[in-house]
Image (spheres, rainbow, N blue to C red):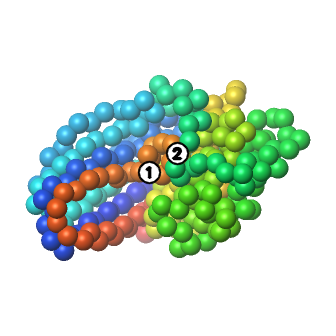
């Protein structure tokens, strides 16, 4: 499936920022599930210096940028990726980080008794690891109902479970937490999704979990849509949680209040030609 992506993230400040540094994880992963035919990450609105660029231990390409006296800044992505359905298996990704590293806790995925009980109930009587992973994702989807606008960027898995609702970020954090509760490494993945199961196009980037399954490797689970990632997904990168895997991370010095707007379009070939 050929997917065309346009993604614009624009920042405006009511007083100029004296200095700004950002780390960008905005390039599609290199693995068997996708081939990048074209991809450009441009920056508009101010003079920007591009700094270090490297591939980290998880296989993600990262670049740093910096700027001074910033009143407005836009990061603009345009690209084409050909994807294929590997039933969620992340095959061919070159990475150096061992799976056990993703058993570490983070603030967003920290376990409590309720998450532990949810995990144990989900896998009770299931011995096969892949089946256990599917059961964990289903349990989270039932316990945390997808509800747009119901949580904040810093909501943790335990808080979302207590409320019983959340967005894809919250469900992903909870899947990671319950996987870790039963000894299965889990990590947070960011990327793009062409459409929901009913055909509605997405207007933002998407998140899902990957769980390490012995004999298969990393396998993706999207609790929000009740499926494993297929040809409708473009994978960008991963981390312990949403903060670590964020496509754009930055620090600024001085200046006023920030306003951010995001527009994402993921179209297939037929939509692109219309």
| Secondary element type, mark 2 | loop
Residue 60 appears left or right of 69: right
Mark number displayed over residue 243: 1
Please report contact status of discs 2 and 1: CB closer than 8 Å, yes or no.
yes
Q: CA distance from mark 2 to mark 1?
A: 10 Å
> Which residue does the image show at 74% across and 62% down from the upper left?
142
Vertical relation: 274 (above or below) 243: below
* Image x and y of residue 114, in percent: 72, 55
Image point 56% across, 58% down: which residue?
Answer: 156
Residue at horizontal 22 percent and vertical 50 percent from the top? 21
Residue 17 shows in the view? yes
Instruction: Give the mark toward the camera: 2 or 1.
Output: 2
- Mark sitting earlier along the chain (2/1): 2
Q: Residue furthest front?
A: 113
Q: Which residue is mark 2?
A: 106
Residue 224: where, in percent of width, then height? 63, 60
Pick the residue in front: 212 or 257: 257
Instruction: Find residue 196 and name its label.
Output: none
- Rendering coords of residue 1 (x, y %): 53, 50
């Amino acid at each position: 499936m050929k997917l065309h992506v346009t993604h614009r993230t624009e920042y405006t400040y009511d007083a100029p920022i004296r200095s700004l540094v950002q780390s960008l994880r905005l390039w599609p992963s290199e693995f068997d599930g996708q081939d990048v035919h074209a991809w450009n990450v441009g920056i508009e609105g101010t003079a920007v210096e591009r700094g270090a660029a490297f591939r980290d231990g998880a296989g993600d390409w990262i670049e740093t940028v910096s700027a001074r006296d910033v009143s407005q800044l836009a990061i603009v992505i345009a690209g084409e990726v050909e994807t294929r359905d590997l039933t969620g298996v992340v095959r061919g990704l070159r990475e150096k980080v061992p799976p056990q590293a993703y058993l570490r806790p983070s603030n967003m995925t920290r376990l409590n008794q309720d998450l532990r009980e949810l995990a144990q109930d989900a896998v009770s009587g299931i011995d096969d690891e892949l089946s256990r992973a599917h059961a964990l994702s289903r349990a989270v989807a039932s316990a945390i109902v997808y509800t747009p606008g119901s949580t904040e960027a810093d909501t943790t898995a335990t808080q979302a479970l207590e409320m019983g609702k959340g967005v894809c970020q919250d469900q992903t954090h909870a899947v990671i937490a319950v996987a870790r509760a039963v000894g299965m490494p889990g990590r947070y993945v960011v990327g793009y999704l062409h459409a929901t199961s009913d055909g509605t196009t997405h207007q933002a980037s998407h998140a899902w979990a990957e769980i390490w399954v012995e004999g298969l490797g990393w396998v993706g689970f999207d609790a929000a849509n009740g499926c494993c990632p297929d040809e409708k997904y473009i994978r960008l990168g991963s981390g312990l949680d949403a903060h670590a895997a964020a496509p754009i991370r930055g620090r600024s010095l001085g200046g006023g209040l920030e306003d951010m707007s995001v527009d994402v379009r993921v179209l297939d070939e037929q939509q692109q030609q219309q």
